[in-house]
Image: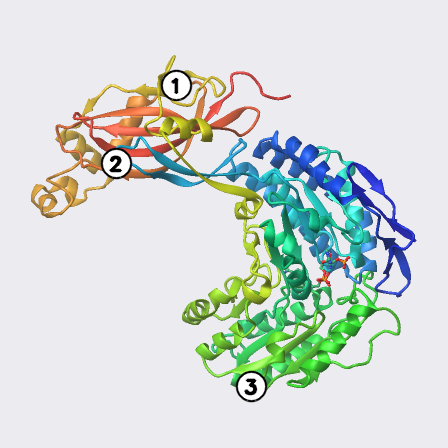
Amino acid sequence: MLEIQSFAAGKWVPPAKDARPIHSAITGDKIAQAGSPLDTQAMLDHARNTGGPALRALTFHDRARRLKALALHLKAHKKPLYALSYTTGATHADSLIDIDGGITTMLVFASKGRRELPDAHMYLDGELEQLSRHGSFMGQHICTPMLGAAVHINAYNFPVWGMLEKLAPTLLAGVPAIIKPATSTAHLAEAAFRIMLESGIFPEGAMQFIAGGSGGLLGQLGPQDSVAFTGSADTAFMLRSSPHLLRNSVRFTAEQDSLNASILGPDATVGTPEFDLFIKEAAREITTKAGQKCTAIRRIIAPEALVQPVIDALSAKLAEIRIGDPAMRDTTMGALVSEAQRADVQARLTMLTDEATRVYGTNTAPLDHGAFMSPQLLHCPDPDAAKAVHEIEAFGPVSTIMPYRDLPHAASLTNRGGGSLVASVITHDSGVARELARGIAAYHGRIYVNDRESMAESTGHGSPLPHMVHGGPGRAGGGEEMGGIRGVLHYMQRTAVQGSPRMLAAIGQTWLAGAPITKAKAHPFRRHFEDLELGESLLTAAREITLEDIEHFAHFTGDTFYAHMDEDAAKANPFFPGRVAHGYLLLSFAAGLFVEPAPGPVLANTGLNNLVFEKPVLAGDSLRARLTVKRKTKRTDEYGEVRWHVWLTNQDEETIATYELLTMVAFGQSQAP
Ligand code: NAP
């Protein structure tokens, strides 16, 4: 018997005498108990006063590095998690999705954090906004970590992935988490949490854990705290409508149940690769995790003429499923999490069969022990008149097939789910994909289009990916998680900051036009990463552009576009007064003006952003460049990225072009600790 402990305010707390039992999904035996008496106010204080400040002292990159180390630590110690996972009814393949999928999600956030966030404490959201005629008053949106605790309430079906997909963006944002998993699989979540905690990789107070009920925690939350909930619509409604949470405007994100659909395109007839793909995806979604997936296909929407072929092919595929002990590698479908869950699914199945006829599956349990259930395929011939099939989620291996007449009908049936996490469209016809995407996108968090071109590498209808948004409108909860850095920003406050360029540059640690510049102490290309200062600037000599330069460049590169070569044709163009220099010629000459040729700290030019040509350059005009250090980001112990603001002007100091130049610049001495 496992005693599942909570981790509260720096201490493990064992379960109380009246703790809730956890049963094996396979044998039905009581295998663990969870439910500790907790001082939830002390937990919140610990998160707010110890975990939060320690996390916020680190930069995004520090936290991203720790996140990577945490994921790798979990990976190295994951083996015991598999044995526990089988007791939840999960097969080896299901456990891979949960455990390794969770670890991969964390690794993706770690990597995105290093690549897409600055090595700083603040995230600049979007571009600068010019709020005044002469540019002395500007605006910039910034995001900073919220100063409270993030409470994570998770569903039972993915105890590891569900915990990690919320924890990774939270820690990356710099916010401490209090994790409350669902009790029925808390033994697996606790084991994974313990491995992470004992690694000591994140500072004290960064993560706490509640096994069992959360006591008075939600009633103690304040305006800097947040709740990210995953579970049923009923629980979400009950929790989010708490007057205390509403009065304090506590952020509440809900990922709840959803009647996801998969649509078979009219082109995907029997014998096409898309028809076979559709059957494969549908069977996988019905049986993976025994259908206990928030993203599982609950409604199969097929052209009228293809309904019977789909029933036949899908039934044949489901007949191949091997139900049994999840620990056996040849088992392809395990058990539901508990006998109570199976009873719940069976009750909902009864409601569905008022409107739909069972065409595959039986009421007889496939094994005489545990929470096993056979896959169930229902057929609803009149989905317009039906209600339950669009509203009742049987959270198990249950799906209903229904016919559509044409694409608008398919879209309207899909949207009858009232808002879903995902819909898939299986078609090889890009016109069908476009029309359905327009018809259903507003009701869905994700649209998964698959066909013969993408099927070999596609990730599956049911797989939320850390790069992409997970969540959906309406019935699905109206929340949004993950989606790359978007998921991190959910744990931060976005603030509009207005002020002079000097103030904005100091706040955002990013130089901007109009902020003070300093003359470089030496040529900036001779200065090492750590020596370069924001606003350090070089003004080059001027260079005249001749007609010979333009012609030489044209013939050398092959760019003999008429605007550079033909005076009359150029004049007839509304943008040019006559023959003009190539934009790329100007960029090349600018590089020639500011480059310092000898080997030195600048290692490479890695790109150029936001290039804008503002004024044409004619033969006889001259060009000079101002190069200013805009932003610095350490990349490795050997070098960092320096972004330069480049400003090209003519002889009258009019702007010709501006852009951001990216370079990698070496440190003068190793930064290795
Ligand atoms: P649930 O019964 O709604 O429980 C969800 C979570 O809420 C559990 O951790 C539960 O803890 C907790 N909870 C219940 N009452 C609470 C209270 N008064 N205060 C604080 N926490 C409370 O859902 P479930 O049975 O675990 O999960 C299945 C459902 O989740 C399905 O409907 C499925 O569609 C949905 N789901 C959605 C997503 C998604 O991303 N959208 C993902 C997975 C699952 P206890 O277990 O201790 O009661």
Task: Note whether 54 is above or below 296 in the view shown.
Answer: above
Q: Residue furthest left?
A: 568
Quarter of the figure with residue 524: top left
Of marks 2 and 3, the one in the foreground: 2
Which of the two labelled residues, at mark 3 and mark 1, occupies the earlier sequence position? 3
Q: CA distance from mark 1 to mark 2?
A: 32 Å
For marks 3 and 1, give the CA distance. 73 Å
Residue placed most toward the observer, 541 or 378 = 378
Question: Residue 213 in the image: x percent, y percent?
Answer: 78, 54
Q: Quadrant of the C terminus?
A: top right
Residue found at x 67% / y 58%: 239
Is residue 241 shown left or right of residue 602? right
Which image quarter has ligand 1? bottom right
Position of 453 compared to 627: left or right?
Answer: right
Dot 1 crowding, Cα within 10 Å, few <14, some 14–19, many 20+: many
Q: Earlier in the sequence, mark 1 or mark 2?
A: 2
Residue shown at 50% from the left, 27% from the top: 640
Q: Helix, strand or loop at disc 2?
A: loop
Tell which tag, 1 or 2, sits nearer the viewer.
2
Write down the residue under mark 2: 133
Three-letter code, disc 3: Ala
Using the rendered image of the protein, determine whether residue 248 is visible from the camera's viewpoint.
yes
Q: Position of residue 596 (x, y in %)?
A: 35, 19
User: For residue 524, which numbered disc appears in the image?
Assistant: 1
**Ligand 1 within 8 A of label 2's CB?**
no
- Which residue, given by chain and number where applicable, does mark 3 sit on? 385
Nearer the observer: mark 3 or 1; the answer is 3
Q: Quadrant of residue 92?
A: bottom right
CB-based contact (under 8 Å), mark 3 and mark 1? no
Q: Who is closer to the viewer here, 391 or 404?
A: 391
